[in-house]
Every structure is written in C-alpha cells, then in structure tokens.
Amino acid sequence: MIVLGIDPGFARCGYGVVEFKNKKGTVLDYGCIEPTVKQSDEFKLNFVYDELEKVIKKFSPNLFAIEKVFYNNNAKTVIKVGGAIGVVKLVAYKNGLEVMQYTPLQVKMSLTGYGKADKKQVQQMVKNVFKLDSIPQPDDAADGLAICYCMAVDKGLI
C-alpha cells in the first residue's frame, strides 16, 4: 500500500511517499513543491498541480492524505493556503484518489503519543520510525512523511 502525504502550502507544499508492507513503512520519496516567488498566484497554483500530478504518476499511491490547516490570524495567508488545498484536492480527485484529512494534533499523537509535541520532536520521530539517516529537510517534507505515518496508523497499516 503506497501512501502520499501532503503538507499543503502556497509557497511550499511538502510531500512524502511511503510504501507500507507487513506493518513496516519504507520511504520512497519526499520533498517540497516550491513555485518561483515572482510568479503570479495562478502560475503558482498550476505549478503545484503539475508537480503533484508528476509525483502521483510516478508512484501510483493507493491512499492520499493532507494535513488540515488550522486557523491563522492572517486572512491573506489563509486564503492563499486554501487555494493550494483546493488544487491539492483537485489533483487527487482527477487521479481517482480519495482525500483523507488529519489535524496537526492527530499527526502528532500518531507519531509521538503527545498532541502538543513540538516540530523537532515530530521530525525526530519521522527519522526514527522510518529508519532514516537524517531528519528530512525542509520541515514541510518531514511533515509530509508524518502525515503518511498518521494515515498508516489510522488505516491499520502499521
């Protein structure tokens, strides 16, 4: 079972791809989709769509999960991230994938057993559970892998 986890964002969209077999997860890929800063909003959203579609075509995930965005005081940021979430959901739909959403609390609980774990604790646990040599960088990529793990726990894959 291949899981694609997305940490949605407008300026940087983190992703992780993990294959789960026999209650173990093997990282296939992770990274960030980062549109050029000076491009229009429409270009950036299209870039996220195109790059995410390439990841889907390359790995053919069975399951697709994104992190639910929490409320932010900056309305402009929330609107832009909301646009990115819409694009992420659209590319999943166009590729026949159901989207599951997990809150940051759920992701932290699944990895650390503590819903208020800080970013460094989550990153260290991602490194540990997937037996990686180092913490995935940037942070958004590690978050993509954390979302994969959360979905795997939710679906009984580990």
Image (cartoon, rainbow, N blue to C red):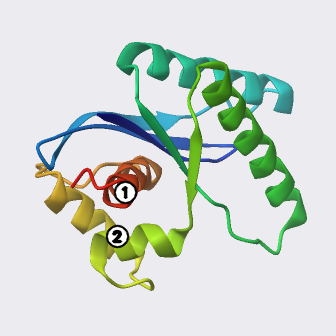
CB within 8 Å, label 2 to label 1: yes
Q: Which of marks 2 and 1 is nearer the N terminus?
A: 2
User: What kind of residue is marked 1?
Assistant: Ala
Disc 1 secondary structure class = helix
Please indicate, yes or no, whether residue 48 appears anywhere in the rendered image.
no
* Residue at the (44%, 37%) spot, across then down: 63
* Residue at the (73%, 33%) spot, across then down: 87
Location of residue 139 by image quarter:
bottom left
Please provide percent x and percent y for residue 123: 31, 64
Choose between 125 and 3: the one closer to the eye.
3
Label 2 to label 1: alpha-carbon separation: 9 Å
Residue topped by disc 1: 146
* Residue at the (36%, 20%) spot, across then down: 59
* Residue at the (61%, 47%) spot, across then down: 8
Q: In which quarter of the image is the N terminus?
A: top left
Disc 2 secondary structure class = helix
Q: Quadrant of the C terminus?
A: bottom left
Choose between 18 and 40: the one closer to the eye.
18
Tell me: residue 74, above or below residue 1: below
Residue topped by disc 2: 110
User: What kind of residue is marked 2?
Assistant: Ser
* Disc on res. 80: none
Tell me: residue 93, above or below residue 107: above
Circle 1 packing at 10 Å, graded few (<14), some (14-19), many (20+), is many
